[in-house]
Amino acid sequence: MARMSTQDRALFTAAELALIESSRPPKIDALKPARVKAQMARARAYADKYRDLARRQHRAKKGAFGRGGPPGAVNQRTERKEELLANALQRFERRLAGLERATRRKPSRRAKPSTGQARGAVTQRETLRRKQQRRQALSKATTSARVARQFQKTRMRAIQGHIRGRGQRRQGKRDAR
């Protein structure tokens, strides 16, 4: 990986330069996944900022000089900044992908039942899991009924009807103008 030239370093602010430097080894290797994600977000924001700025400068130059105007040195510097920040973003993304690959675990084999446990017996953990699944299924089925009861209890349906009617009347007045 080539180092940045002195001219490239002069393009960046101290914060941007620190971000780019942290995207290179050995600094990137020391970053934890949460920090890599934060640095990715910053790099993406800076790259987007300079990409948009380059587009605006290009449109402004095109409008001032028509087609084929003189090449803008300012625009070239902005495009170079965007390119270097996009490269830093790619390095962060590769590092995050590597970290995620390393943290994924292979599926382990199922533990054999202990000697005191019969083959067909259900463990306590399995019993709790099944109970939780039944509760969740029951709660999903009764969610709509519970919401309906809540509307009835608090008279929300009547209140919402009044609000809707008021909105319709206001819209009718605006349309009549």
Image (cartoon, rainbow, N blue to C red):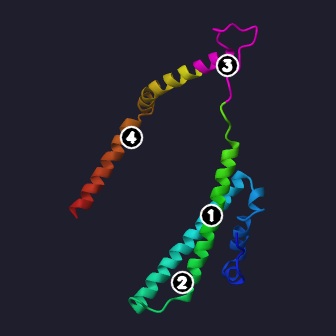
Residue type, label 2 = Asn
Q: Give the residue pinned by disc 1.
A: 89
Q: Nearer the viewer, mark 1 or mark 4?
A: 1
Q: Nearer the viewer, mark 3 or mark 1?
A: 1
Q: Give the residue pinned by disc 4.
A: 159
Q: Nearer the viewer, residue 155 or 44?
A: 44
Q: Residue at x 44, y 91 (%)?
A: 69
Q: Residue at x 65, y 31 (%)?
A: 107
Label 1, label 4: how far apart the Cα atoms are = 51 Å
Residue type, label 4 = Ile
The location of residue 4, given as percent across then percent down, is: 70, 76
Residue type, label 1 = Leu
Q: Give the residue pinned by disc 3.
A: 125
The location of residue 5, given as percent across then percent down, is: 70, 80
Give the side of residue 3 with respect to residue 149, left or right: right
Q: Nearer the viewer, residue 116 or 174?
A: 116
Residue 111 is drawn in which quadrant? Answer: top right
Identify the element where label 1 is drawn. helix
The numbered mark, 2 or 3, whose residue comes first in the sequence reads 2
Q: Which residues are magenta?
A: 108-131
The numbered mark, 1 or 2, whose residue comes first in the sequence reads 2
Q: Nearer the viewer, residue 159 or 74?
A: 74
Instruction: Specify the label residue 119 is tagged with.
Output: none
Identify the element where label 3 is drawn. helix
Principal secondary structure, stretch drawn in magenta: loop
Identify the element where label 2 is drawn. helix
C-beta proximity under 8 Å, tags 2 and 3: no
Identify the element where label 4 is drawn. helix
The numbered mark, 1 or 4, whose residue comes first in the sequence reads 1
Q: Give the residue pinned by disc 2.
A: 75
